[in-house]
Amino acid sequence: MPLKIAEICQSPKFSRWRGQNFWGVWVPLNVASPKRTERDQIVSGVIYEGRKYVAEGFPFSITCLKSSYGVPKWTRNGLSIDQLDPEYVIVQESVPDDGIRMELRVKMAQWKHRGHYKCDPLSKKSHEIEIVPSR
């Protein structure tokens, strides 16, 4: 419900000031900012989840949440990952509010798996994987 000028002027937080050429009114406003929803995050780009450092010989996965705009395709260091490559398992599903959740899984990390992974080749964001020697 909008407040009328008379109600604002009677508020204890209302104040007036006078400058050289003007009268001013100060009225405090509390504006609630909306919470970022999953949809806001999807529309604004790509979100990755997963470890950066992976021990050689151990499994790893990268999860990506992106808008349905663009091409949903995994790349590593700018090169396409073949969905039929037996080293990778790729899972993709639609999520509410026009998004896509993609997961890339590797059963046994090797030195050749290091690099920058993207689920949308046109996105600037990527997820880096570093392979470290296992003990």
Image (spheres, helix red, strand yellow):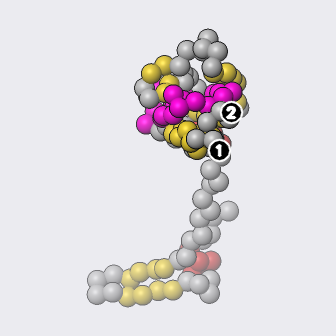
Q: Is 95 on the left-hand or right-hand side of 44?
A: right
Q: CA distance from mark 1 to mark 2?
A: 15 Å
Q: Secondary structure at mark 1?
A: loop
What residue did someone put label 1 on? 135
Instruction: State the image coordinates of residue 3 (x, y, percent, origin top left).
Output: 62, 69
- Give, as a three-letter code, the residue at label 1: Arg
Residue contact between numbered discs 1 and 2, judged by CB atoms under 8 Å:
no
- Give, as a three-letter code, the residue at label 2: Pro
Which one is nearer the viewer's eye here, 12 or 68?
68
Q: Which residues are magenta?
A: 101-124
Q: Secondary structure at mark 2?
A: loop
What residue did someone put label 2 on? 59
Q: Does residue 110 show up magenta in the picture?
A: yes
Q: Residue at x 43, y 36 (%)?
A: 124
Q: Nearer the viewer, mark 1 or mark 2?
A: 1
Q: Residue at x 48, y 34 (%)?
A: 115
Q: Residue at x 55, y 83 (%)?
A: 14
Q: Residue 134: which quarter of the image?
A: top right
Q: Does residue 54 show up magenta in the picture?
A: no
Most extreme residue toward the front is 135
